[in-house]
Image (tube, rainbow, N blue to C red):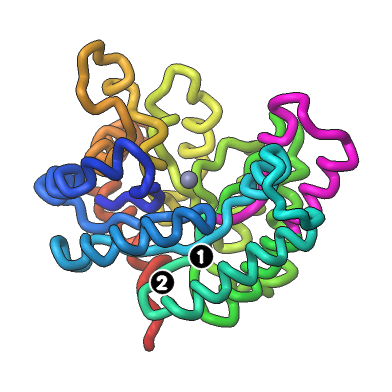
Amino acid sequence: MHDSHIHISMSPLKENIETDIQEFIDSNGKKILVQTTDLTDYQDTLEMYFSLQNKFPNITDFALGIHPSRFEDGLAKNSLDGLDLFKYAQKQFDIFEEIFIKNIQYITAIGECGLDYYGMYEYNQFTEKQREELKEVQRRIFTKLCILAIKHDLPMSIHARGVNGDSSCVKDTLSIIAKEGKGTLRGSFHSYTGDKKMLQKILDLGMYVGFNAIITYPSGENVRDILKATPLDRVLFETDGPFLPTQSVRKKKNSEKKYGRPLLIKEIIEKASELIHEPYEKVEEVSDINYLTIFSKRDM
Ligand SMILES: [Zn+2]
C-alpha cells in the first residue's frame, strides 16, 4: 500500500512520523509521497525527508509545490510584503523555482498545486475584485508549474476545489492541463470531491484520481460514487494526513492518534474494496502499480 498525499511537517504527524512510518511498513506499506505547500514548509519537509531516507530507505518520495490557497492567506493576513498580489505571487514562484532547481535530484513530483476557488468564499473577507484577482493569480502560477512539470518530465499532485455546484474551478484546471500539457502531462487529482460529470474529462486527460478517508465517512456518498466510476487502474490512495482521519479513528473516544497517518490507508483500501467488489489484495496491488507508474523517478 502507498500514501500518495501527506503533509509530514504538520503537527501531530511531525512529532510522530518515525513510529507512524514504522507501523505503515509493518503492514506492507511501500511508499509515501510527501507534499509541500509553501515556502515555510519546504525547509522543514526537506530536512525530514533526508532523515527519513536514512532511517527508512526508499519509502519516502518528495513533492515540491505551491498550494493555491497560499495567495489568499497572504492577502488575508496582509503579508504581501508591500507588493500587489501579482508581484507577490511571482516572488513566491521565483523562490520556489530556486529551491526546485537546487533540489531537483530529490524531487519526485510537483505538488501540491492547482486551483482552489472554495476557500476565498468561505469567510466574507474578500471583495469580488479581489476574488477575481486571486483566481487569475492561481491560474498563472499553476500554468507556470505545468510548464515546469513538462520541462522536467515530472508528475503533478493536483488540488482542484470549487464552490459546491460550480465546476468552473475543475474546468479551469483541466483547460490549463490540456493547453500546457499537450497530452503528455502526468498527474493525480488528489481528493477529488467535485462533479461526477467532470470525472470523465479528468480520465480522458490520462490523469489518476486520489481517494482518501472521505470514502469512509457517512457524508462521503458523492466521493464513493466517484470511486465506483473510476477504473481501478487510475485509482490512487492517500491520507492527506494529518487531516482526514478515517471514520473508525474519528469515532473512537479516547484514541491517542486522532489524525490522518499512513497506516490508515489500510482502512481506506478495505472500504474501497467493499465498494467496488474487488478483493483487498487486488485493490492494494493494482493501486501500488498505479503509484509506481505515475510517480516513478525519471531517468537522471
Ligand atoms: Zn494536501
Find residue 228 and report its horizontal and vertical position in percent: 47, 37
Q: Amino acid at mark 2?
A: Ile
Q: Is residue 1 left or right of residue 111?
A: left
Residue 273 in the image: state x and y as whole percent. Answer: 31, 37
- Magenta-highlighted residues: 113-139
Image side of residue 56 versus residue 300, left or right: left
Nearer to me, 19 or 80:
80
Identified at 64% across, 62% down, the residue is 92
**Can residue 56 be seen here?**
yes
Report the residue that reaches farthest toward the left.
Answer: 26
Pinpoint residue 28: horizontal percent, then vertical percent: 15, 50
Q: Position of residue 176 (x, y in %)?
A: 73, 62
Q: Are marks 2 and 1 in contact (CB under 8 Å)?
A: yes
Mark 1, ligand 1, within 8 Å: the answer is no
The C terminus - image quarter? bottom left
- The residue at 77%/54% (across/down) is 82
Amino acid beneath label 1: Ile
Classed neighbour count for the residue bearing mark 1: other residues with Cα under 10 Å, few (<14), some (14–19), many (≥20): many
State yes or no: residue 123 in magenta. yes
> To which residue does mark 1 refer?
110
Residue 44 found in image quarter: bottom left
The residue to which callout 2 is attached is 107
Residue 268 figure quarter? top left
